[in-house]
Image (cartoon, rainbow, N blue to C red):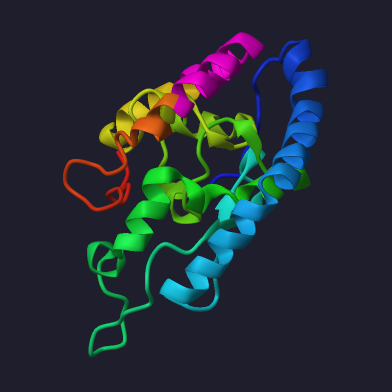
Amino acid sequence: MAEYKNNHKPYGPYERFFKRPLDIIFSLLALIILSPVLLVTYILVVVFLGFPAIFKQERPGKNEKIFKLYKFRSMTNAKDKKGELLPDEKRLTRFGKFLRSTSLDELPELFNILKGDMSFIGPRPLLVAYLKRYSKQQRRRHEVRPGLTGLAQASGRNSLTWDKKFRLDVEYVDNLTLKQDFGIILKTIGIVVCRKDINSNTSATMEEFMGN
């Protein structure tokens, strides 16, 4: 895979001077306010799913820099006779489905935002393995920090096809403004409250992206 180069024109004042400070302020406030929820969720994950309660996985961030993503576990480690993990739908428990539908599993990502790995709003950080499968246009989703939520999540979440998600990711990159971020936050709140578009039409989570 070719080395990543960010050739996008400079962003406006919001991205250059305000977006990161706002991420720091609001992630710190959220961690303080939601600390009881984080603690209770951690305990429940240990009780229902066991240790470790925190799921860690390498993901590509801005300019494809690799970082460790933090989430609450939502699946068991059940394996078949060959010692290989069972499919997601067999490892995703009722409690795990609840965590995903309420987005409680995403709360540890607040630490990623505080650290600077992520932003509140931006394209979702996907698997490292996908990097070599993107088209040149799709790779542009890495011109900004990945987000806790994004335009694709506010527009249909896992009910969208990969192609549609990536087009929305690049659309977000090309139109990065405070107004757009605020609108995405409002839409995301509505989706989470209504627990909409959690799964794809053919999978318990989301099908693997195999390339174009």
Between residues 171 and 186, which one lies in front from this camera angle? 186
Counting from the top left corner in percent of width and height, residue 161 is at: 27, 33
- Most common SS among magenta residues: helix
Query: Residue placed at 32% from the left, 76% from the top?
Result: 85
Query: Residue placed at 18% from the left, 41% from the top?
Result: 201
- Which residues fall within the magenta stretch? 171-189
Counting from the top left corner in percent of width and height, residue 26 is at: 74, 33
Counting from the top left corner in percent of width and height, residue 98 is at: 36, 53
Lateral position of residue 35 relative to residue 102, left or right? right
Counting from the top left corner in percent of width and height, residue 12 is at: 73, 11
Whether 188 is among the magenta residues is: yes
Spot the residue most to the bottom.
Answer: 81
Above or below, 103 against 190 in this view is below
Above or below, 113 against 177 in this view is below
Above or below, 31 against 46 in this view is above
Between residues 51 and 116, which one lies in front from this camera angle? 51
Q: Quadrant of the C terminus?
A: top left
